[in-house]
Image (cartoon, helix red, strand yellow):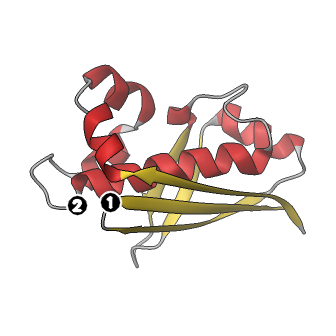
Amino acid sequence: MVRGIGLDLCGIGRMRRACALEAFLSNVFTEEERAYAGAPEKPLYYAHLAACFAAKEAFSKAVGTGFSGFQPADVSVAHNAAGAPYLKLAEPARKAMAAIGGQQVLLSLTHENETAAAVAVIEG
């Protein structure tokens, strides 16, 4: 049963500007997310980070609370061996999902030109 759904868009140019601040990078993204994105010189660096940010926002919308009770870094985008994205949730984010009866999150990411998007579906 679907317990929540969230959708978010993130401008890649906006992410490029925000990432100029190290505090933003370290407060929002996990080391794993930053490592996956690579270096700023990598062609899709900002697109990857924008998609991760959109995923965090989509999850916060799916639980219905925004970032109340957890921080963006408590929601981390990882990838399985085939490259499919999934969310790793720290305890505060897991609690928010459990509060709505959620047991798992389905995630879809995309990016093209100057926009990244994410959809998060919480099932329970």
Q: Report the disc number at residue 49.
A: none
- In the rendered image, the quadrant that contains the N terminus is bottom right
Question: Within the image, what quadrant is residue 68 found in?
Answer: top right
How far across and down, in percent of the image, does residue 73 sit? 50, 34
Give the spatial CA distance, label 1 vs label 2.
11 Å
The residue lying at 31 percent from left, 57 percent from top is: 47
- Which residue matches tag 1? 114
Q: Is residue 81 above or below residue 18?
A: below
Q: Residue pushed farthest top?
A: 23
- Which residue matches tag 2? 44
Q: Nearer the viewer, mark 1 or mark 2?
A: 1
Q: Nearer the viewer, residue 111 or 72?
A: 111
The reply, left or right, for residue 22 in relation to residue 61 is left
Question: Within the image, what quadrant is residue 7 found in?
Answer: bottom right
How far across and down, in percent of the image, does residue 14 sit? 34, 42
Q: Amino acid at mark 2?
A: Leu
Q: Amino acid at mark 1?
A: Glu
The reply, left or right, for residue 72 in relation to residue 10 is right
Question: Within the image, what quadrant is residue 90 found in?
Answer: top right
The reply, left or right, for residue 26 in relation to residue 84 is left
Near mark 1 (Cα within 10 A), the count class, few <14, some 14-19 or many ≥20, is: some
State if disc 2 and disc 1 touch (CB < 8 Å). no
Q: Nearer the viewer, residue 36 or 4?
A: 4
The residue lying at 87 percent from left, 40 percent from top is: 99
Dot 1 lies on which element? loop
The residue lying at 36 percent from left, 47 percent from top is: 33
How far across and down, in percent of the image, does residue 116 sit? 42, 60
How far across and down, in percent of the image, does residue 12 sit? 33, 52
Between disc 1 and disc 2, whose residue precedes? 2
Q: Is residue 21 above or below residue 121?
A: above
